[in-house]
Image (cartoon, rainbow, N blue to C red):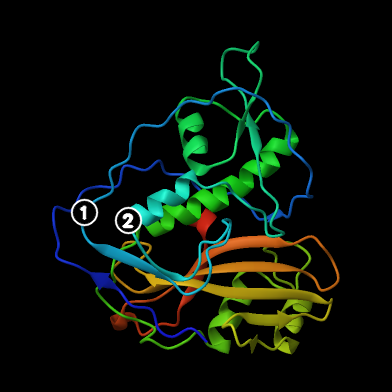
Amino acid sequence: MVGPLKYVTLATAAAGGLGAAVITGGPLFKDIPDKPDPVIEKSLPVSAAYTPPADGFEICLTADAPFFKDETAGCYDRDDVDRLRDLKLLSPSGAQITMMMAHPTDYDLEPAPCATCREYAASLAEGWYAPTTRDIRREAFFQRACGFIDMLATAEAPREPFFGGRDLSADDVEIIARAVAFGDPRDGQATSSAEKDQEEAEAVQADDGRWTMNARDERVLVVSELARADFDGDGVEDVLVFLTSGYEDGSARVVDLGLLRGAPAREKAAPSYVSRSALPPA
């Protein structure tokens, strides 16, 4: 089991603002079937050089980074996080995800492939867009993956701890399950059936630290902790989590990235869960 996270603050130099493009998360999405992508030799816009702030802060991942290959648990400084923007994205099944982006005004120009968050941010900045339903579905994946990078890039050391170095608990996982209406076939609409599913589901922690809940309809929810920091700017410690759910014997997975948010001590409140897509821009 992974131990508590650490927050590393080296000698503080000039604290600069983050210059990365803000990409908001999209709705939950299903895993994309593995199909080869066409190779089209077209060029997307090139984004301006990014200079991360020299504040010495490191964000520590307690699990391997989703969306990328071989980005393992460990501590990442601002440069390390920015480097993720140049990596090709992978689906939960390990297949490379590429989407096509179309020029906003030159309709004779063929769409160009986009494979990294740097390419995606640059194309959005110049008005390029996803031209087909297939690409729109894939864009939701890019929004999720690039939103993950943005969360790491804007994280700060919390001024107020909340979880006290403890691991996530079954109560924490149940809060997340209720927030995503786990067990309810209608997304976000709580029903008595869903509530009964949650009452009967039991959160079980695996040796690798992930939590699993099984609903009556044979769906499985897996909760993986990724990192701890102040992700929403209120100064209180939060936990960045990665969720997958789907039928036990099925291949499709619904994925979400969100925060288990700590509350200020004065409020004496339990943590709450919010999806990355529901958070305001960083």
> In this rendering, does residue 282 appear at all?
no
Residue 203, horizontal then vertical, whole percent: 65, 87
Q: Nearer the viewer, residue 266 or 88?
A: 88
- Image mark for residue 54: 1
Tell me if 233 is positioned left or right of 186 in this view.
left
Badge 1 or badge 2: first in the primary sequence: 1
Is 32 drawn above or below residue 123 in the view shown? below
* Secondary structure type for disc 1: loop
Amino acid residing under circle 1: Ala
Residue density around tag 1, few if under 14, some if 14–19, many if 20 or more, within 10 Å: some
Q: In the visual, does 106 lie left or right of 10? A: right
Q: Is residue 103 above or below residue 144?
A: above
Locate residue 239, reporting x and y percent: 45, 73
Residue found 38% across the figure and 86% down from its top: 165
Q: Judging from the image, what secondary structure is the residue with disc 2 in?
A: helix
Asked whether, in this view, residue 63 is left or right of residue 199, the answer is left
Left or right: residue 12 compared with residue 194: left
Question: Residue 211 sits in which quadrant?
Answer: bottom right
Q: Nearer the viewer, residue 64 or 146?
A: 64
Residue at the extreme front: 70
Neighbours of disc 2 within 10 Å: few (<14), some (14-19), many (20+) = many
Where residue 150 appears, as percent x and y from the top left, is 42, 52
* Image-quadrant location for residue 101: top right
Query: Which residue is painted at 69% across and 74% down in the image?
Result: 221
The CA distance from mark 1 to mark 2 is 8 Å
Residue 47 vertical position relative to residue 281 in the rendered view, above or below: above
Q: Residue at x 59, y 40 (%)?
A: 115
Q: Given contact means CB atoms under 8 Å apart, are the residues at marks 1 and 2 in contact?
A: yes
Residue shown at the point (52%, 37%) measured from the top left: 120
Label 2 sits on residue: 78
Residue type, label 2? Arg
